[in-house]
C-alpha cells in the first residue's frame, strides 16, 4: 500500500472476513461429529463416508459433470467465434442485434432464461418432435447459451489485447488466414480459452434455477439435489459436499493460474527471441 | 479484415531481399486448394458469423418471442398447458380480449404489484450496500503494491468459483435461531432469547450482498486501477485535501466502474429466486419467487410468462445502460 491507511486495511480485513468466514465455518463443521450443525461434538469424517454412500448425490454429480463438460466445451467454441466476430470482423449485418444477444445473458435473471428456454423446448417438441422429453440435452443447450456469453467476454478481452504482428508475419510468410489463426492466434488465445472453459464449467455446475426449468423428471443435477435437501434443513452431509466442492474449485484455479502463468512466460520468451533473431537476419540480409 | 492490404505490400517489399531460392508466395500458397480449403476460403467468414448467430437466434431470441406469445394465451389443462393462438383467425377479437387477461390479472392482484415493488426495493438497497462495502475494498486493492494486489484480486475472484447455492446455504447455519451468531450472543449473555435473524429482511440483504459483492468489486477495481495517480498528485499539489480530491477527481473518474458494478448486482438481484427462497422471510415476496411458484406450483404457464414479460419491462432500462457501457468499454480496449 502506498499510504497504509488504517481505514483501507480495515475495509479489506472486513471484506475478506465477510467473504470467507461463512465458507470456512462450513468447512470446519463438515468435520463435526455431532449431527447438530452448530454444536461441536469432536472431529469426525463420518459425514464424508455417508456422502459417498448416497447414491442420489453421486448420480446427480455425474449428471452435473456431464452437462458441465459438454456445455463448457460447446460454449468455448461458440464464444471464441463470437469474440472473433466482434473484435476482428468490423461491421457486419445485424451486429447490433448480435451484441445485444451476447451481452444480455450476463445479467438476465435466471428465472426468465429458464422459463423462456423451457417454453421453447416444449414448443419445439410439439412442432418437430425434438427434443423428445427433457434431460441432459436440454440442460446442456441451456447452459451453453449463457456460458457462451461469459466465454465471449473473456476471449474478447484477450483478443483485443493481442499483438497482431506475429499473426501478420505468418501471413507474410505465406500462411492462409485460417492457418495463421490455428497456428498463431489460437495458441496465443489459449489462456483465455482455458479460463473461459473453466468459467463455463463452474457456472454450469453451479446453476440451479435454469436447470430446474429445463430438466426432465429423469435428470437431476447436483444443485437440484442440494437445494431440495437444504430446503428441508441443514445437513452435515451437505457441509461435507460443500467442502469438497470448495477444495476442488480452489485447487483447480490455483493449478490453472500456475500453468497459464508458466506458458505465458515461455511464449513471451520464445516470441522475443524469435523477434531478436529476425531482426538480426534482416540486418545481415540488407547488408548482403 | 482491415489489415488485408498491409501484408501484401510488405510481402512485395520483402521479396526484394529474399534469397533467390525461396518461392515468392511461401510454401503454403503454392499448393492447390483442397475442396474443403476452397469452401473455407470462400465461406469462412460467413460460417464464423452464422454459427454463434444462429445459436443465439434459436436459443436466446426465439424463446423470448415464445414467452411473449404464451403470455397472451390462456391457461388450460392439458399438454401444452396453454391455449393455441392460431384460433385468432376465426374469433380473433374475442381471443385477444381474453388473452390480455393475464396482464390485467397482474394489475388486479396486489400480490404481484407488491412483489415487483419489493424486488426493486430489495435490489436497490442491496446494490447500495454492496457499493458501500465494495468501493473501499476495490480502492484498497487498486492502491496496494503489485504482489499483494494479485493475491487480493484472487481472493475476490475465488468465491465466485465456489458454488453460489453452497455460499447461501452457509448463512443458514450462521443466522438461524440456534446458529452461530445467536449461540455466541447468548453465551456472552448479551441476549436471553435468540434474535430472529433467518428469514427476515436482514438475512435477505446479507445473502444478496454476500453473493454479489465480487461482481461489484471487480469492475470498480478495473477502473480504479487505471486511474492516473499523477492527477491525484496534481490535486494535492494544488492544495486539495484528500477527501476533496476523492470527491472531485477519483469518484467521477471511477463512475464507469460504479455503473457496471451496480448493474451487475441490481439486474440479477431483481429476479433472484434462491436467496429469497432460502434466506428471505415469508412476508418479503420477490418477483423471481412468484414466477417460480406460479410455474411450478400453480402450473399456470401463461401467467408465469406474463410475470416474466412484466419483469423484463422493468429491467429494459438498466439492461440497455449495462450493454451501452459494456460496448463503450470494449470499444475503448479494442481501439487502444
Image (spheres, rainbow, N blue to C red):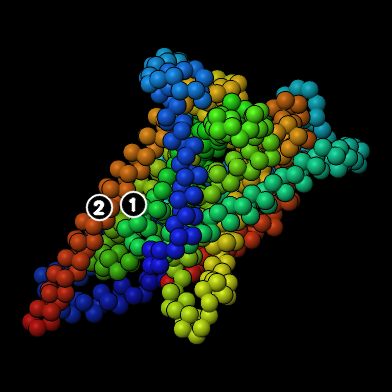
Instruction: Work out whether residue B26 or residue B161 is closer to the camera in this orientation and state it.
Output: B161
Task: Inspect this view and state whether residue B322 appears.
Answer: yes
Q: Which residue sits at x=29%, y=50%?
A: A260
Does B189 appear above or below A18?
Answer: above
On the same chain: label 2 and label 1? yes
**Residue matched to label 2:** A263
Q: How many numbered circles are shown?
A: 2
Does A185 appear above or below A116?
Answer: below
Residue at the outermost bottom position: B238
Q: Which residue sits at x=69%, y=27%?
A: B296
Tag 1, which secondary structure? helix
Residue A124 place in picture, x, y as percent:
63, 33
The reply to whether the C-beta atoms of the residues labelled 2 and 1 are less than 8 Å apart is yes
- Left or right: where does residue B14 sit relative to residue A113? left
Q: Which residue sits at x=60%, y=21%?
A: A232
Residue at the outermost right position: B94
Q: Cα distance, mark 2 to mark 1?
A: 8 Å
- Left or right: where does residue B151 sit relative to residue A97? left
Instruction: Work out whether residue A245 or residue A82 is closer to the camera in this orientation and state it.
Output: A245
Quadrant containing the N terminus of chain B in the rendered view: bottom left
Q: Earlier in the sequence, mark 2 or mark 1?
A: 1
Task: Inspect this view and state whether residue A183 appears.
Answer: no
Residue A37 place in picture, x, y as percent:
51, 23
Q: Label 2: few (<14), some or many (≥20) within 10 Å?
A: some
Residue A161 place in picture, x, y as percent:
38, 64
**Residue matched to label 1:** A191
Mark number, residue B229: none
Instruction: Work out whether residue A151 or residue A264 is closer to the camera in this orientation and state it.
Output: A264
Quadrant containing the C terminus of chain B in the rendered view: bottom left
Tag 2, which secondary structure? helix
Amino acid at each position: 500500500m502506498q499510504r497504509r491507511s488504517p481505514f483501507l486495511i480495515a475495509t479489506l480485513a472486513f471484506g475478506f472476513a465477510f467473504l470467507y468466514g461463512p465458507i470456512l465455518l462450513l468447512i470446519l463443521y463438515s468435520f463435526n461429529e455431532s449431527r447438530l450443525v452448530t454444536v461441536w461434538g469432536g472431529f469426525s469424517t463420518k459425514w464424508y463416508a455417508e456422502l459417498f454412500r448416497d447414491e442420489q448425490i453421486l448420480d446427480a454429480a455425474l449428471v452435473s459433470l456431464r452437462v458441465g463438460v459438454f456445455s463448457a466445451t460447446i460454449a468455448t467454441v461458440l464464444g471464441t467465434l463470437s469474440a472473433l466476430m466482434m473484435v476482428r470482423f468490423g461491421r457486419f449485418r445485424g451486429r447490433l442485434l448480435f451484441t445485444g444477444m451476447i451481452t444480455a445473458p450476463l445479467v438476465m435473471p435466471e428465472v426468465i432464461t429458464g422459463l423462456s428456454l423451457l417454453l421453447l423446448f416444449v414448443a419445439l417438441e410439439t412442432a418437430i418432435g425434438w427434443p423428445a422429453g427433457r434431460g441432459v440435452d436440454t440442460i446442456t443447450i441451456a447452459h451453453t447459451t449463457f456460458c457462451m456469453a461469459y466465454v465471449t467476454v473473456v476471449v474478447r478481452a484477450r483478443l483485443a489485447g493481442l499483438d497482431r504482428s506475429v499473426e501478420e508475419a505468418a501471413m507474410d510468410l505465406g500462411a492462409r488466414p485460417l492457418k495463421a489463426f490455428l497456428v498463431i492466434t489460437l495458441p496465443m488465445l489459449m489462456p483465455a480459452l482455458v479460463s473461459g472453459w473453466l468459467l463455463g464449467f463452474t457456472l454450469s455446475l453451479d446453476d440451479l434455477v435454469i436447470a430446474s426449468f429445463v430438466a426432465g423428471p429423469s435428470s437431476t443435477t447436483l444443485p437440484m439435489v442440494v437445494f431440495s435437501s437444504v430446503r428441508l434443513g441443514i445437513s452435515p452431509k451437505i457441509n461435507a459436499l460443500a467442502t469438497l466442492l470448495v477444495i476442488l474449485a480452489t485447487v483447480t484455479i490455483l493449478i490453472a493460474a500456475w500453468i497459464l502463468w508458466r506458458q505465458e512466460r515461455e511464449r513471451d520468451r520464445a516470441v522475443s527471441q524469435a523477434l531478436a533473431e529476425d531482426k538480426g537476419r534482416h540486418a545481415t540480409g540488407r547488408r548482403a | 479484415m482491415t489489415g488485408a492490404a498491409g501484408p501484401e505490400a510488405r510481402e512485395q517489399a520483402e521479396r526484394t531481399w529474399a534469397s533467390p531460392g525461396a518461392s515468392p508466395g511461401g510454401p503454403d500458397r503454392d499448393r492447390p486448394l483442397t475442396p474443403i480449403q476452397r469452401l473455407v476460403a470462400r465461406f469462412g467468414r460467413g460460417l464464423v458469423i452464422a454459427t454463434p448467430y444462429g445459436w443465439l437466434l434459436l436459443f436466446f431470441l426465439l424463446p423470448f418471442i415464445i414467452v411473449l406469445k404464451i403470455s397472451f394465451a390462456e391457461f388450460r389443462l392439458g399438454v401444452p398447458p396453454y391455449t393455441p393462438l392460431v384460433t385468432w383467425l376465426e374469433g380473433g377479437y374475442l381471443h385477444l380480449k381474453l388473452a390480455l387477461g393475464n396482464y390485467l390479472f397482474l394489475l388486479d392482484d396486489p400480490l404481484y404489484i407488491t412483489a415487483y415493488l419489493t424486488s426493486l426495493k430489495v435490489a436497490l438497497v442491496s446494490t447500495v450496500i454492496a457499493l458501500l462495502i465494495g468501493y473501499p475494498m476495490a480502492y484498497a486493492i487498486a492502491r496496494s503494491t503489485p504482489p499483494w494486489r494479485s493475491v487480493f484480486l484472487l481472493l475476490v475472484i475465488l468465491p465466485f468459483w465456489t458454488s453460489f447455492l453452497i455460499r447461501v446455504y452457509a448463512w443458514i447455519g450462521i443466522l438461524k435461531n440456534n446458529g452461530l451468531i445467536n449461540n455466541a450472543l447468548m453465551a456472552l449473555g448479551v441476549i436471553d432469547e435468540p434474535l430472529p435473524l433467518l428469514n427476515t429482511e436482514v438475512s435477505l440483504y446479507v445473502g444478496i450482498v454476500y453473493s454479489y459483492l465480487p461482481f461489484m468489486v471487480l469492475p470498480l477495481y478495473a477502473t480504479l486501477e487505471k486511474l492516473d495517480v499523477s492527477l491525484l498528485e496534481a490535486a494535492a499539489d494544488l492544495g486539495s485535501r484528500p477527501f476533496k480530491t476523492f470527491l472531485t477527481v477519483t469518484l467521477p473518474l471511477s463512475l464507469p466502474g460504479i455503473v457496471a458494478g451496480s448493474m451487475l448486482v441490481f439486474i440479477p438481484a431483481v429476479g433472484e429466486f434462491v436467496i429469497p427462497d432460502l434466506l428471505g422471510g415469508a412476508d418479503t415476496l420477490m418477483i423471481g419467487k412468484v414466477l417460480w411458484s406460479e410455474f411450478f406450483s400453480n402450473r399456470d404457464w401463461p401467467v408465469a410468462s406474463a410475470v416474466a414479460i412484466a419483469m423484463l419491462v422493468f429491467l429494459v432500462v438498466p439492461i440497455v445502460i449495462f450493454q451501452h457501457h459494456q460496448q463503450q468499454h470494449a470499444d475503448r480496449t479494442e481501439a487502444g
